[in-house]
Amino acid sequence: MTGQEQDPQLAQAQREHWQHTYSAHPGMYGEQPSDPADHAADVFRTAGARDVLELGAGHGRDALYFARSGFTVQATDFSAVGLGQLTHAARTQGLGDRVATVTHDVREPLPLADSSVDAVFAHMLLCMALSTAEIHALVGEVRRVLRPGGTFVYTVRHTGDAHYGTGTAHGDDIFENGGFAVHFFDRDLVNALADGWILNDVHAFEEGDLPRRLWRITQTLPR
């Protein structure tokens, strides 16, 4: 399906799957931030960022960490259930004035003005069930909303992952295992998404079961 929109039935099935998952397992990723978020906070702070947009924030462990670190956070996800858990946690932790949430599907334009945020973070959001064309469109939207010199940190599972090529194949390097569909990245896609950016770093790491094999990409808009 390269160059096309993703199957709408797959997109709807994934949305329902995540809604059910967050309902059945509140706070499923725990309260501690991910290692990529810890890295991103340092990068954003060094760059002088004040506001952060997190895409695919889920129930908010990383969004809350950014807020505790002093950033103003806008968090989006297509799961209203996950964002409800995030909003409740932000209020409970006294961070309600630093975290705003918007239910949003990244297949649609981002609900922000041009050049309106200093930094964008997305942990395993770009490798969801998105076609290559949709991923390119999303990165174009990230570029639009970032201010000049802004930083984008994202993580993706790559083609060296144990689940690559297994389970149900949906085309365009998307494979579904256990109900979760993943678009596995190769290095050519990472490079293509960095066209017109400064590609600062591509860092390989592992996380969770199997373990999952990922890249953490840091790229900056020219000033």
Image: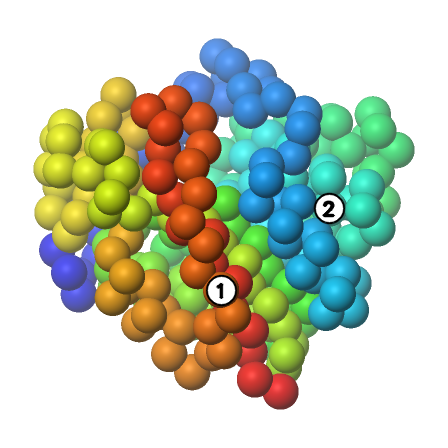
Which circle, 1 or 2, is nearer the viewer? 1
Name the residue type under label 1.
Asp
**Residue 72 location (% of width, % of height):** 78, 54
Query: Residue 57 appears in which quarter of the rendering?
Result: top right
Which one is nearer the viewer's eye here, 142 or 213? 213
Quadrant in the picture for the C terminus: bottom right
Q: Mark 1 sits on what residue? A: 201
In the rendered image, the vertical position of residue 203 relative to residue 137, given as above or below = above
**Position of residue 53 in the picture relative to residue 158 (left or right):** right
**Residue 216 location (% of width, % of height):** 47, 52
Q: Which residue is found at the position 51% from the left and 50% from the top? A: 122
Name the residue type under label 2.
Phe
Q: SS at mark 1?
A: strand
Q: Which residue is found at the position 28% from the left and 53% from the top? A: 185
Seen as rendered, the residue at the extreme top is 24
Is the Cβ of the residue at disc 1 closer than 8 Å to that at disc 2? Answer: no
In the rendered image, the vertical position of residue 74 relative to residue 119, given as above or below = above
Seen as rendered, the residue at the extreme bottom is 223
Evaluate whether residue 24 shows in this view.
yes
Residue 29's disc is none
Q: Mark 2 sits on what residue? A: 66
Evaluate whether residue 111 shows in this view.
no
Please tell me how crowded label 2 is: few (under 14), some (14-19), or many (20+) other residues with Cα within 10 Å. Answer: many
**Residue 32 location (% of width, % of height):** 67, 28
Which one is nearer the viewer's eye here, 142 or 221? 221
Which one is nearer the viewer's eye here, 154 or 21? 154
In the rendered image, the vertical position of residue 107 relative to residue 145, given as above or below = above
User: Between marks 1 and 2, how big is the CA–CA gap?
Assistant: 21 Å
**Mark 1 or mark 2, which has the lower sequence index?**
2
**Residue 103 location (% of width, % of height):** 55, 43
**Position of residue 45 in the picture relative to residue 162 (left or right):** right
Please tell me how crowded label 1 is: few (under 14), some (14-19), or many (20+) other residues with Cα within 10 Å. Answer: few
